[in-house]
Image (spheres, rainbow, N blue to C red):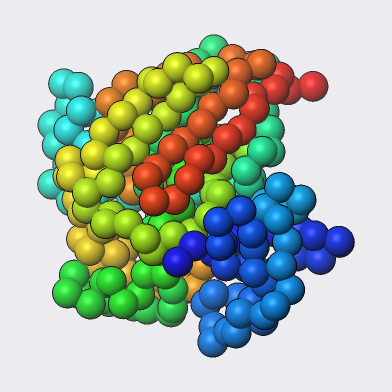
Amino acid sequence: MKFARYLAHGQVSYGVVDGDTLREITTTPFEEYQVTDHTHPVSEVKLLAPTQPSKMLAVGLNYSSHLHDRPAPQQPLIFIKTTSSMIGPGDAIVRPNDIETLDEEAELVIVVKSRCRNVSKAEAARYILGYTCGNDVSGREWQRGDGQWWRAKSSDTFSPVGPYISDELDPGNVMLRARVNGKEVQAESTTYLIFDIPTIIEWTSRRMTLEPGDMIFTGTPGEPAHLQAGDTVEIDIEGIGVLSNPVVAES
């Protein structure tokens, strides 16, 4: 099943995706809900970021192809992305004027289903609603030069997510692709994750309570591409869809 969060006729709702149609549900997918007979064509609504998380976490250096000459981490390298940096499908990524290198990073994103703490790997799946596409936009000079990654990873618009939440995939074996202006710049299967999804849930929930709607970016493969104003970047994950965002210059 796929879920979308969307704006139609001035109202924000959740719906189940049925082909090119959204079927509104009575509440959120994190609660008991009913599917109504109220429908919208997907083309006639504004798709929004698919959850309103209390927090977003991310895993660094989680593909061997992204390590280059760095050693593999011995435990998941977790950092926080602020919710204020989150944008949805079609929203613009703002490229700061005072940065030389801004990169896209295609990532599979876990969407937490229910409140949990200290979850084992064996139990992890029951606390996951599904997965969405994410772009961990990264300011490289800031990432290398700052003591913390607050502006490199959490500047406004640096966390595009969407378009849907899907449970129709095997997170341990799904293709992840990124394109800039139609040219493929990243392509790798999640089979190459260093720390898999159950391990990530176990590790993060050991010290932090995860809440419904929270999101965890699981890492990016290979060599991400640089972004310039005027570009369009797409994150494409089979079983979910395509997250597309334009890049604009800071005004």
- Which residue appears at 24% of the width and 44% of the height? 190
- Which residue appears at 22% of the width and 53% of the height? 172
Quarter of the rendering occupied by the C terminus = top right
- Which residue appears at 55% of the width and 56% of the height? 19
Q: Residue furthest right?
A: 10
Question: Where residue 129 appears, x then y in whole percent?
Answer: 42, 69
User: In the rendered image, which quarter is residue 170 located in?
Assistant: bottom left
Query: With respect to residue 74, does 139 lie above or below?
Result: above
- Visible residue check, residue 243: yes
Question: Where residue 216 appears, x then y in whole percent?
Answer: 40, 55
Quarter of the rendering occupied by the N terminus = bottom left
User: In the rendered image, which quarter is residue 111 located in?
Assistant: bottom left
- Visible residue check, residue 136: no
- Which residue appears at 60% of the width and 18% of the height? 231
Query: With respect to residue 237, does 141 lie above or below?
Result: above
- How many numbered discs sit on the rendered protein? 0
Query: With respect to residue 71, does 32 lie above or below?
Result: below
**Nearer-the-camera pick, 205 or 143:** 205
Question: Where residue 227 appears, x then y in whole percent?
Answer: 53, 18
Question: Where residue 97 appears, x then y in whole percent?
Answer: 67, 17
Relative to 120, 233 lies left or right: right
**Nearer-the-camera pick, 68 or 41:** 41
**Nearer-the-camera pick, 174 or 66:** 174
Relative to 144, 151 lies left or right: right
Query: With respect to residue 110, does 39 lie above or below?
Result: below
**Nearer-the-camera pick, 76 or 144:** 76
